[in-house]
Amino acid sequence: MCALGISKPIVILRNIFLLCCIVFFFNSVQAQKKNSDYQLHIRKASSAIVIDGEMNEQAWQEADVAKNFWQILPMDTSHAAVPTEVRVTYDNTNLYIIAICYTSGDKPYMVESLRRDWNFLKNDNFIFCIDPFDDLTNGLTFGVNAAGAQYDGMLYEGGSNNLNWDNKWKSSVKNYPGKYIFEAAIPFKTIRYKKDNLQWGINFSRLDINVPEKSSWAPVPRQFPSVSLAYTGVLVWDQPPPPPGLNISLIPYALAGVSKDYENDTKSKFRKDIGGDAKIGLTSSLNLDLTINPDYSQVEVDRQVTNLDRYELFFPEKRQFFLENSDLFANFGYQDIRPFFSRRIGLDVPISFGARLSGSLDKNWRIGVMDMQTKSVDETGLPVQNFAVIALQRRVFSRSNIRFLFVNKQSFNYELPKDSSLPVYSLYNRNVGVEYNLASANNMWTGKAMLLKSFSPGEANKDFTFANDIQYLNRNWKISWQNEIVGENYNAEVGYVPRKDYVKINPAIAYLFFPKHGSILSHGPKISSTYFFNTSMKQTDNESYLSYSINFRDQSTADVWVSYDYVQLLQPFDPTNSDKDTLATGTQHRWNAFGIDYVSKPQSLLTYDFSTRIGGYYAGGSRQSYSGDIGYRFQPFVNVSLSASYNHINLPAPWNVSDFWLVGPHIDVTFTNNLYFTTFLQYNSQLNNINLNMRLQWRYQPASDFYIVYTDNYYPAPLSVRNRAVVLKFTYWWNL
């Protein structure tokens, strides 16, 4: 471990963490599932079921009923005020569910639009989660808002949700006086499960934002999400679930488009491409995904931010191929220590083909293997490159796991360029790592310990990374500790590690008070401090943060905060990120700041939020920052929103005064549950660019789409086109 440059204090911290793991072992190994007494028996349907939002089939009359829901919010100590009743059944093809969601009074339901994967907190909704292996860690969630828009996602790490996952299922919602009924058919081919497992984890959740109230069938403590897999009940099958049978899906696409670069006055470029994906269910829980010449032009554009950071910004993965079981690959590590980041593959260069094998081998073992190959680019001298990833996860104790990861990036037939203007690419880069993820049966104790090593041509020592954290969370307290050590020569070319050669320590503590009466549901302080040191334990950064949060009973929230910052620059830095002069390496900077954040109640047609920051900045300067969002819904068909941020920075010469605007109006029109039109405009004064993205999507059948995507980039002043593109894309999901 000497190659890490770890000092004695850090070794002591590591030993303290390992001691916590040992203490936690005794809690984990003896713990039982919290809601094992909440059991719902599922029997095979005695009649055919039509998905129409009407409970008139004999099979529903015979099914067991899950009712008497418990409140999660505003307080988790009583039964729900608005009743919900749920029934489930199945046949040889589908899992069926029907939910009667009663409402209070004559108030209309509240939804944003008919768009899929809506914002959970801004819609009256019903969702449910399933954990087919009953491992309390991984699962799926499905649901609808009160207008019938679908919602689905993959659950990982006990309750985190990836809504970018999208699959094939059918649902219907019908509104009645005083209630709405949700009915759905989930094909067994959509679910990954062990065919002889007679008990699945399951829970049902309801959000009525008019009351306001969030509730669930099996009780969930208020500090956790309603899809927390540690608190699922049990779905008891009358016989083993039927095997999905032949489970092969072909998803071809055809594309045509044209683009023109007006800035460089080049000729129009015409596109016509075909390609596609295939999904092959090797078992009911293990899936093989294949892709040839993929295209992701229909993926929503990234939301821009004003970049005043010293390090690279992170944007999430949205491409569908990389999403199923993505936690096996992408969640290894920490927020700023990711040995694998799929956006490194194929964003600036076409992908030739790829394959991914992922899923569960049994209740204890999960596996992920991915291989992607990109094309060469003559203009930049980029060679053909291959990206291979292997992930293996073993469950230990009740909800914890040990995970192994190997990442390899390889260049083929590559020689150093003779032209010095061309970039130089590495022959290979490899990463290998192991981590232990701990989670108690009641989810109150969570943590991680991780070790990584990289391999590159000519790489010296100090190429290790070590990090760990532990967190305790109950209704009142949230206490956490995290420390990281990233070696000077650690190199993750297929990862996201914006900073190297540091030691980080981050303690934090928060507490909530719960008044018995009044408009405030809870309130309390939080204090955290993040310290960065070099590997000789000399401090280079510190941000200390004190805040006070107020959560109102109408679901609006407010925060006030103050902070202290210290930065010793490790490299030259332009504090405006606008190609002006730079501050020198080694210079020290200190400042204080304060701010207010507010989010309005969601049960209004007009919603808004805002954030402010006022205080010092680099070189004795000052920075004022104001940002906010405002939205209005003409429900359920139109949702109009506007995001805006303004930064006023005052620095000594040569920077002087800098004003940065970022404005983004967004119009979302959902004509039906299957026909969407979105217009997204972004004006970024820091980049001197206006971006327009318009997308029409017609889901003519489940998981099959036709897209028209139009993109423009402009210079703001004088207004002139930089580049323009339009794409037509057709996809079809074909089950064999």
Image (cartoon, grey):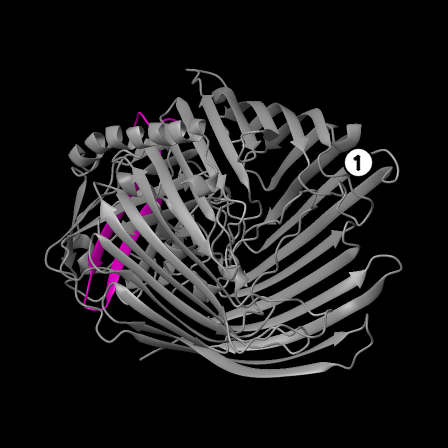
Q: Residue furthest left?
A: 239
Query: Would residue 38 be seen by someone viewing this image from the given angle?
Result: yes
Query: Would residue 210 be seen by someone viewing this image from the given angle?
Result: no
User: Could you tell me which secondary element the residue under label 1 belongs to?
Assistant: strand
Quarter-of-image position of residue 261: bottom right
Residue 283 spot, x, y in % from top left: 23, 68
* Local crowd size for mark 1, using a 10 Å CA cut-off: few (<14), some (14–19), many (≥20): many
Marker count (numbered): 1
Instruction: Tell which of 599 and 17 is nearer to you.
Output: 17
Q: Quadrant of the C terminus?
A: bottom left
Residue 237 spot, x, y in % from top left: 14, 54
Q: Quadrant of the N terminus?
A: top left
Q: In the figure, 8 relative to 632: above or below? A: above
Q: In the figure, 648 relative to 275: above or below? A: above
Residue 465 spot, x, y in % from top left: 45, 44
Q: Is residue 101 left or right of residue 547?
A: left
Q: Start and end of the magenta stretch? A: 75-101
Q: Is residue 44 left or right of residue 295?
A: left
Instruction: Tell which of 613 and 374 is nearer to you.
Output: 374
Q: Which residue is mark 1?
A: 649
Residue 158 spot, x, y in % from top left: 33, 44
Given the image, on which type of amino acid does mark 1 rest?
A: Ile
Quarter-of-image position of residue 538: top right
- 84 part of magenta stretch: yes
Q: Residue at x 68, y 76 (%)?
A: 379
Q: Is residue 34 left or right of residue 17?
A: left
Q: Residue at x 56, y 50 (%)?
A: 635
Instruction: Tell which of 595 and 554 is nearer to you.
Output: 595
- 158 part of magenta stretch: no
